[in-house]
Amino acid sequence: MLLGRDAIAAFTAQVLPGAMSDLTCSMEVEHVLFVRPDVAAVKVRQRYTSPDGRRAADEGEGTPLFVMAKEAGRWWLTACQNTAVADS
């Protein structure tokens, strides 16, 4: 579990560079629920494509839930749960 901005920044700096250099990730907002005017739960559909634009089926899809909070006029990602979509 990663707690705090410093822990998250250190982890992502270590594992993300080059991790998806051969894929592009697209996210499409499917639903937004405003919990308060400054807090929103955002459900998205996450899909991966190869450099030639074909869907990367091996990567599957994700359905992240982002919790966003507005602070000083900007929206910030404050929490995320990402779950892969299982084939049935």
Image: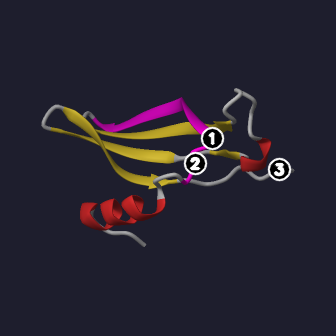
Taking the image as shown, residue 46 lies to the left or right of residue 74, namely right
Amino acid type at image mark 2:
Met
Taking the image as shown, residue 25 lies to the left or right of residue 33, namely right
The residue beneath circle 2 is: 20
Taking the image as shown, residue 15 lies to the left or right of residue 78, namely right
Which portion, as a residue range, is magenta?
A: 19-36
Taking the image as shown, residue 86 lies to the left or right of residue 48, namely right
Q: Which residue corresponds to the image point at 55% horizontal and 34% vertical from the top-left?
A: 27
Q: Quadrant of residue 40?
A: top left
Disc marking residue 87: 3
Looking at the image, is mark 3 or mark 1 nearer the viewer? 1
Distance of mark 3 from mark 1, alpha carbons?
Answer: 21 Å
Q: Chief secondary structure of the magenta span?
A: strand
The residue beneath circle 1 is: 23
Q: Is residue 56 magenta?
A: no
Where's residue 11, x and y in %?
39, 65
